Image (cartoon, helix red, strand yellow):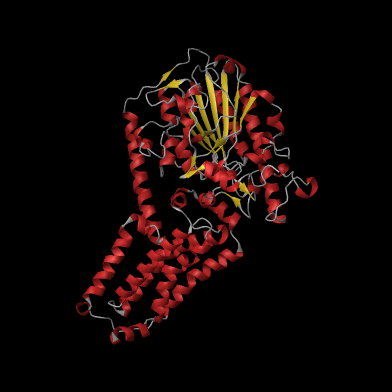
Amino acid sequence: MSEVLNILKKKKIQLFFLFYVLLLLPLLCPFAQNFSFIDKVAVFVVCGLLFAAIWALSLFISSKSEKIIYSVMLAISVIPGSIYLAYLLFARVMLEQNSVTSLFETNPEESKEFVAHYLSIWVIVGVLIYAAIPIVMICTMKPFTKLKIRDNKPLFALSIVTILCIAGVDRISRSVYFINFYKTFVSYKIRTNYEIKTIKERQKEDYTVESVRQDTTPLTIVVVIGESLNKHHMSLYGYPRETNPLLSQLGDSLIVYKDIVAPQVHTIPVMRSILSMAEPEHPGYFTEKPSLYELFNRGGYGTYLISNQEFNEDCKSSYDILLTLAEKKYNVAAYKQHDDIILPVLDRIFNKSANSKKNKLILIHLIGNHMAYEFRYPKEYIIFNYKKDNLVADAPFRDDKAKKTIDKFDNSVLYNDYIINSIIHTLKDLQKEDAVMIYFSDHGEELYDYREFAGHAYEKVSPAMSEIPFIIWMSPSYKTKRTDLVFDDRRPYSTEDFIYSLSDLAGLRYKDYNDSRSLFSREFKIKERFVGEKKYKKIKEKFGEGIMNE
């Protein structure tokens, strides 16, 4: 015992190092708004046990080896630790599993803009200090005489078993931030590689897709997916600012759905959901059943993708492969321009297929209203000023800076109105074709609606992030022909089932088609809606209306 005490006296810095690396974030967990009391206790207990086990094991390691091991530990923990700490500082939440996965899927350009929007001098200083302190500690560690394993076998064995159990058991290891970070990364890469391989292979398999449309008139369907649009900032949904002057002029020809919810609050999981038949109860359907482009390719449609958000044709993610299944792809995100860059591409598609009798599906992915909002529109759309119009509702958490941010967001909504209206007018000009346009945002965006926060994060999920605009325009000829469809703008619906609704609108049928999950079907059935793993109804009850409709 005296030998152990003598070692402990010389290992004070090592003790503090382990405490710092393993227990600092758990000690800060009480500041996380998304963790329950039980979550906080569980994190601290698991990390405390890991701290004790590593500390005990370090008694059997030489001073030189210990420095090497602690340097490796610092190297693997500093990046995830900095990410978790930064997130805690600016968002007041601890990252959850869904968001950790989203980190690996986010493209570099989106990450830069996210950092630019949230980064502050205090976050930078906090992260730099957090990373620097353990480096100093490693450099100042004093040498000591290690314990002999043969004289302390029970302590050595217990330490090894404890570490292996914590690292090996998935539910337990999630409580240790850096273990969870790397295990999630490995799991993500394995899953992605499997999905890409499987989806490529299934293109050779037979899968019959038939059309119930008897009409020979060519049909063009344009699906426009926006980004981070809060529907409560659209005058189409009652917002006091005139953010939709052009779409409002379309009157009854525009069907504006009132109660649509996104299946997640991050772009990639939403896109995975709307482009596939995967569902929370059956995630395997992602690889087992055809995706959206596959269905329309087999259904005889010419399929197109125009994206102002980065995707990779080398298929670095399963999201990429779902998009690259389109026959024609236009990746305009590389030009880093506003969303009007998609308009000449759309014109080019129609000019090239002017004499074609083939049906077309054109999916357009906008950068939309993604933060930082001031980058989403040209200078002529700098219109709104809260000091002049007094239309931004007051709240304790809305200072001048917050109201300026809302001005910028509303400018981006106004510009988005121009983009969508331009697409509709392009479709109106088509000769001898039926046409449909569907617009919806991937997810919503919170704008100081309930608290001092703007953006979207699953850990802080709210109605503003979950509720999305959903708008349909149809050429009069096509609307007249499809008397079998129901256009009830008050149906509660989640875009999780979008693939069935689009199939119904296009008149496609296949063995996995489910009529009860189409928004436009007479057989439509209302079901419980989820945002990630959380019930939308519970989210709504927790937050109420906030100040969105004031």
> Quarter of the image holding residue 416?
top right
Q: Number of labelled discs? A: 0
> Quarter of the image holding residue 92?
bottom right
Residue 472 visible? The answer is yes
Q: Where is residue 126? Give x, y as percent.
A: 55, 67
Left or right for 257, reference 14: right
Q: Where is residue 314? Give x, y as percent.
A: 41, 42
Left or right for 394, reference 331: right
**Is 182 drawn above or below residue 74 in the view shown?**
above
Left or right for 107, reference 391: left
**Is 179 drawn above or below residue 313 in the view shown?**
below
Residue 336 visible? The answer is no
Nearer to us in this view, 512 or 535 = 535
Q: Where is residue 110? Give x, y as percent.
A: 53, 49
**Is 215 drawn above or below residue 182 in the view shown?**
above
**Is 440 drawn above or below residue 385 in the view shown?**
above
Task: Say which quadrant the N terminus sits in.
Answer: bottom left
Residue reaching furthest to the right: 388
Residue at 21%, 80% (x, y): give it.
151
Nearer to us in this view, 95 or 245 = 95
Residue at 36%, 84% (x, y): give it.
10
Residue at 35%, 45% (x, y): give it.
191
Residue at 75%, 48% (x, y): give it.
386
Residue reaching furthest to the left: 150
Q: Where is residue 215? Give x, y as percent.
A: 50, 12
Task: Say which quadrant the C terminus sits in.
Answer: top right
> Quarter of the image holding residue 11?
bottom left
